[in-house]
């Protein structure tokens, strides 16, 4: 019963027969790649939306697809409540105490009962507890609480970092990022403004835009400083002083500053950085299910956080290669207010951008809401999949019908039938409409593996967040070698120290004044690599700085650090002012010649490219691709191969199965005619495939004629002609033959499915390393000389004062 996992299909539930009013045994398997065209879940409170969302997320996790789940109500934390043993003790901390009391049970006894109840529920949906182990193994589950230390906080405000290249080079995306950041910061201040006329908005956007265009990160402190004293004098064609006089700017800066000083605000500054890549994958590239719990936040704070998160996610997305296979999911429960039809909150532009662009990158967006009126029409019509649950108000039903009619091919929409279906939906029952399927289908959601305990308390969230409440150290970037330098001795008034003639000098641009210049040895070179077999032909500019050390050899390139700074940012000559470190005695023209030689020698041996190769997929990493990135890519590659394989199988077998099923139907009809029977029900169930998985796999897409018979074409004229038993026997004989052929075909398909590579785990994949040495003779050393590195003394020690 686990074969559907091989197919990249999400097991969402079983078909519900609206006519007969009962659950069938037909699995509803949703093709994961259909989710790249996004989905909406609509249904009244209690209709089972969150349960369906959790089903979807669990299925994604099993397929090692990472998920970011935004949780405004606090229900999604339940995704962390899955226990491979499903024992009472596992559930005890999470069960509802009041309910236990009402039933006159101790929490422990109630938990045991609940564990049994859950086990039974899962079993009824053909899921053994071993599936929970599989789920836990496939992904890492984490809960974050932005703006609060109850769980793991997210440092949203630590930096307004320069957006990635992919955003900066796209004028529309860059403008959107600037505008939505400004809007969301103002939202945090409680200011809902018109971006076109509000001077606060215009000023913030200008400050952000100019800093980012220049490649400078901002933090809140610098943002405040720049609001008071912007590094520009005009806005558009008007003088800054006219648009927003200094006195007023001061007031605005104060407002921002008060935000900083507000109690509890430091929670926005600590924790893991807001980084979509880190929310989607662990350090080693294992997929994550990250629940972002925002139930504790006020409306404005929620808007701020969601917008910043969506912006970052867009940046991540744009750095991914294109794919037709699902790569990641963004799920949002209760999306009301974030993507409304008329108003234009900060979150709306990035949401619309995601719905428009995410498909190409394999990012599926799933939005859940109670009321169709909460969703922008463009969002609704852009969604390829609709899960429609029970709706209460007639108005809601009407709106959903309109929307559905709009996205359904004309001529195929039967409004009356659809209205009836929707009106009859019960709890956990959804109408699945998908642009990828031939017709809609009603199903009941499968039992979740996660224990649905309801909203979690602060204490419960804390328990689920190891390391929560502890401030997380900021990432430091000082490099070992460049910091172990000689102590400064010069008087700032004295200027740069004398350096022997013939030794070229360089310095790195300092960020800010009041720095101490420490000398090191700079090396800049081009290193070339060539390997025809591996299709590698590239040249790289490298920049190194080696420290001066005490001892007979003053410069050891083995101690050098590669600088992540472009050679073009290195200035020639000594810096004009500051405190300077002592120039070591080893700095001479003769020493320089020696460093040049040893640099070239060292580059040849130390600069080999290390590439990884996947043993089973035979894929090679690209130069500069980290092991984490490579493993993430391998997982996606395996999924793409699987999807291609599955599509080919379906292509190959669906018509064959369809043809045989039609034949069988005809043979059965004949028997019925011969016997004078017309029990349509019996016939229909008999025609469906022997295996529920195959039925679902081949079922809805191609076999529309079978579907039609399934949906009930009972009213087929059947004569009541009594025939001789010989005719009956002949008809039965031919039906049996077709049945046998169908059974053989089924076996063949099963065998083919069995051969589909599945369960590929990039985390466990053995990697070979391939080393490519620099091309001999193609080494080009551009510069070697004395370099001055700016450092700043801080209470926390000496920090680099140059930007990467
Ligand atoms: N897939 C499911 N498996 C088990 N129980 C479910 C499932 N879906 C819903 N339920 C039950 O129904 C209740 C209401 O469903 P829920 O998904 O929270 O509705 P909604 O999100 O639409 O308000 C849940 O608290 C849970 O007890
Ligand atoms: Mg819900």
Image (tube, rainbow, N blue to C red):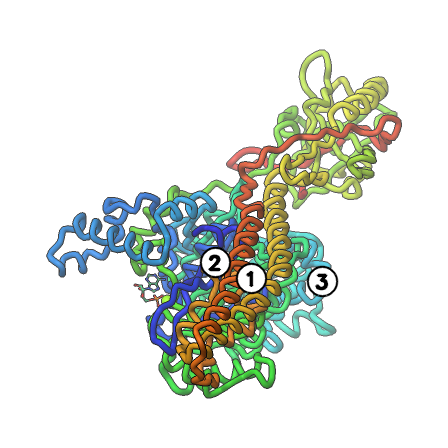
* Quadrant in the rendering for residue 600: top right
Residue 422 is left or right of residue 654, and the answer is left
Give the numbered dot on residue 693: 2
Q: Is mark 3 on a helix, strand or loop?
A: loop
Does the residue at mark 1 contact the one at mark 3 (Cβ under 8 Å)?
Answer: no
- Is residue 183 visible in the rendered image? The answer is no
> Which quadrant would residue 55 be assigned to in this image?
bottom left
| Foreground of the two, 700 or 245 | 700
Label 2 environment density (alpha carbons within 10 Å; few <14, some 14–19, many ≥20) = many
**Label 3 C-beta lies within 8 Å of the nearest ligand 2 atom:** no
Query: How much space separates mark 1 and mark 3, taking CA atoms?
Result: 22 Å
Q: Which of marks 1 and 3 is in front?
A: 1
Residue 669 image position (x, y, % from top left): 49, 76
Q: Which mark is residue 170?
A: 3
In the rendered image, residue 755, in percent from the top left (x then y), is placed at 57, 46
Question: Dot 3, how many residues are within 10 Å of its Cα: few (below 14), some (14-19), or many (20+)?
Answer: few
From the image, tell me which residue sits under label 1: 364
Tell me the element at label 2. Answer: helix
């Amino acid at each position: 019963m686990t074969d559907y996992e091989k197919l990249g299909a999400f097991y969402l539930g079983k078909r519900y027969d609206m006519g007969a009013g009962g659950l069938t045994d037909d699995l509803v398997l949703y093709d994961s790649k259909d989710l790249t065209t996004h989905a909406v879940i609509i249904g009244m409170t209690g209709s089972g939306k969150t349960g369906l969302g959790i089903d979807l997320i669990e299925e994604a996790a099993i397929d090692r697809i990472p998920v970011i789940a935004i949780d405004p109500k606090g229900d999604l934390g339940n995704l962390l409540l899955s226990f491979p043993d499903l024992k009472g003790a596992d559930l005890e901390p999470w069960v509802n105490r009041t309910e236990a009391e009402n039933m006159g049970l101790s929490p422990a006894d109630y938990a045991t009962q609940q564990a049994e109840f859950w086990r039974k529920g899962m079993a009824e949906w053909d899921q053994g507890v071993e599936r929970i182990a599989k789920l836990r193994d496939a992904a890492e589950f984490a809960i974050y609480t932005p703006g609060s230390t109850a769980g793991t906080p997210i440092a949203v405000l630590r930096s307004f970092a320069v957006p990635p290249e992919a955003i900066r080079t796209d004028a529309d995306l860059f403008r959107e990022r600037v505008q939505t950041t400004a809007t969301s910061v103002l939202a945090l201040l409680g200011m809902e403004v018109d971006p076109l006329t509000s001077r606060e908005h215009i000023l913030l956007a200008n400050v952000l835009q100019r800093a980012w265009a220049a490649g400078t990160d901002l933090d809140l402190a610098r943002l405040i400083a720049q609001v008071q004293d912007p590094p520009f004098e005009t806005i558009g064609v008007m003088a800054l002083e006219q648009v927003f006089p200094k006195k007023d700017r001061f007031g605005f800066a104060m407002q921002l500053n008060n935000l900083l000083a507000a109690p509890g605000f430091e929670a926005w500054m600590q924790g893991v950085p807001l980084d979509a890549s880190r929310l989607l994958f662990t350090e080693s590239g294992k997929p994550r299910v990250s629940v972002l719990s925002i139930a504790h936040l006020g409306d404005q704070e929620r808007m701020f956080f969601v917008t910043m998160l969506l912006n970052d996610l867009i940046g991540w997305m744009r750095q991914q290669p294109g794919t037709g296979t699902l790569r990641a999911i963004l799920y949002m429960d209760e999306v009301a207010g974030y993507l409304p039809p008329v108003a234009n909150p900060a979150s709306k532009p990035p949401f619309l951008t995601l719905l428009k662009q995410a498909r190409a990158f394999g990012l599926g967006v799933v939005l859940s809401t109670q009321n169709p009126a909460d969703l922008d029409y463009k969002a609704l019509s852009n969604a390829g999949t609709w899960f429609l649950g029970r709706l209460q108000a007639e108005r809601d039903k009407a709106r959903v019908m309109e929307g559905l009619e709009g996205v359904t091919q004309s001529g195929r929409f039967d409004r009356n039938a659809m209205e009836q279906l929707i009106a009859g939906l019960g709890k956990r029952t959804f109408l699945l409409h998908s642009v990828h399927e031939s017709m809609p289908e009603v199903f009941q959601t499968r039992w979740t593996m996660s224990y649905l305990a309801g909203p979690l308390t602060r204490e419960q969230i804390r328990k689920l967040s190891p390391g929560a409440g502890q401030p997380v150290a900021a990432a430091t970037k000082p490099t070992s070698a460049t910091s172990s330098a000689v102590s400064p001795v010069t008087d700032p008034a004295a200027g740069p120290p004398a350096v022997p003639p013939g030794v070229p000098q360089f310095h790195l641009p300092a960020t800010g004044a009041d720095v101490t210049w420490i000398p090191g040895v700079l090396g800049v070179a081009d290193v070339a690599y060539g390997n025809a077999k591996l299709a590698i032909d590239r040249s790289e500019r490298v920049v190194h700085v080696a420290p001066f050390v005490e001892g007979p050899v003053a410069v050891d390139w083995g101690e050098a650090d590669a600088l992540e700074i472009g050679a073009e940012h290195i200035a020639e000559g000594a810096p004009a002012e500051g405190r300077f470190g002592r120039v070591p005695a080893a700095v001479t023209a003769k020493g320089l010649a020696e460093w040049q030689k040893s640099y070239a020698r060292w580059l040849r041996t130390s600069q080999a490219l290390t590439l990884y190769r996947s043993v089973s997929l035979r894929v090679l990493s690209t130069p500069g691709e980290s092991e984490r990135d490579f493993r993430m890519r391998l997982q996606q590659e395996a999924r793409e191969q699987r999807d291609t394989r599955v599509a080919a199988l379906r292509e190959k077998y669906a018509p064959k199965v369809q043809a045989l099923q039609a034949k069988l139907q005809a043979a059965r009809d004949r028997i019925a005619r011969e016997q004078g029977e017309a029990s349509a029900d019996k016939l229909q169930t008999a025609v469906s495939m022997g295996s529920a998985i195959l039925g679902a796999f081949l079922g809805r897409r191609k076999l529309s004629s079978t579907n039609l018979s399934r949906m009930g074409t009972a009213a087929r004229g059947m004569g009541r002609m009594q025939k001789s038993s010989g005719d009956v026997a002949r008809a039965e004989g031919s039906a049996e033959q077709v049945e046998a052929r169908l059974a053989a075909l089924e076996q063949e398909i099963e065998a083919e499915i069995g051969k589909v590579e599945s369960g590929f785990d990039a985390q466990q994949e053995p990697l070979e390393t391939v080393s490519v040495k620099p091309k001999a003779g193609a080494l080009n050393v551009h510069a070697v000389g004395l370099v001055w590195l700016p450092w700043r003394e801080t209470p926390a020690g000496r920090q680099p004062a140059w930007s990467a």
